[in-house]
Image (cartoon, helix red, strand yellow):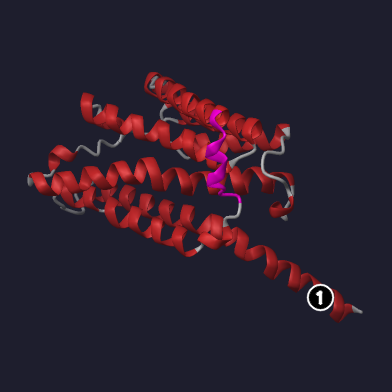
Amino acid sequence: MRSESSSSLADRKSAVDPLILARVAPFGLFMIFVGINEGLHFLIAKGFLTLAPETLLFLYIPRIAAVAAVLWYFRADYPELRFSDLKRWAPTFFSIVAGLIVFVLWIQMTWPFAIFGSLNSDAPTAIREPSLRLVFIAFRLIGAALVVPVMEELFWRSFVVRYIIRADFDKVPVGVFTVASFCISAVLFGMEHNLWLAGIMAGAVYNLILYKTRSITQCIVAHGVTNGVLGIWVLITHAWQFW
């Protein structure tokens, strides 16, 4: 009897773990790269390390390439990514408008109390070679508008929101609302960003999109619009602190 119970538990665990890994691994890898970048900034500031400014900038390329590769590797484990959802014009229009609203609010919510630490400025002007500068800008825009939204929405809206409701999260339909999952995930999403209050606002809006559309794809669209427009705005205004 005990062996049967243990076997059943092992079967359930092996069925759930790959689904968790598929959503946590890309996000975890991204955060490891962020940690390395922050560590290098710290060592340079303290005088323990000397690196050309463009070297730190180019670390973004392997970061985004590695995350994209992991997402592609696990692509079969994301049944909630239904691009057919975009054919529904009303929810798609709503997601695009919501993404634009988040962008407008984001660039306004820069009050000193709403910032963790300091905002590192990833200004491509540090790259002297024009062709290399264009390569960095291209990767930065692609990463921000395409890769990061997929990675973060799979982690936050597909995994965390549902995991707070139930440990075997894949049994929870996408878009199920609870007060705890809404509040906890929005706050944690905010804590991931230097602009923590703007992050909480964005997390709350993307959660609302999730509940209204019941679509992770629509959340990705909104997130991608926010990041893409922000990237273009940064390039036009040279407000590099938002990068």
Q: Magenta segment, which residues?
A: 80-89
Answer above or below: position of 182 versus 83. above
Viewer-closest of 2 and 74:
74
Image quadrant assignment for residue 236:
top left
Instruction: Give the farthest residue toward the left.
Output: 129
One can see residue 116 in this view: no
Viewer-closest of 99 and 67:
99
Question: Residue at image x 36%, y 54%?
Answer: 33
Q: What element carries label 1?
A: helix
Q: Number of marks in the image?
A: 1
Report x, y in % for residue 95: 52, 30
Q: Residues within 10 Å of mark 1 (few under 14, many from 20)?
A: few
- Magenta segment includes 196: no
How would you classify the magenta stretch by its main secondary structure? helix
Q: Quadrant of the N terminus?
A: bottom right
Residue type, numbered disc 1: Ser
Instruction: Give the farthest residue toward the right.
Output: 1
Question: Residue at image x 60%, y 38%?
Answer: 185
Report x, y in % for residue 225: 41, 32
Q: Look at mark 1 in the image and give the residue it sits on.
A: 6
Give the left or right position of residue 165, taking residue 17 as reference. right
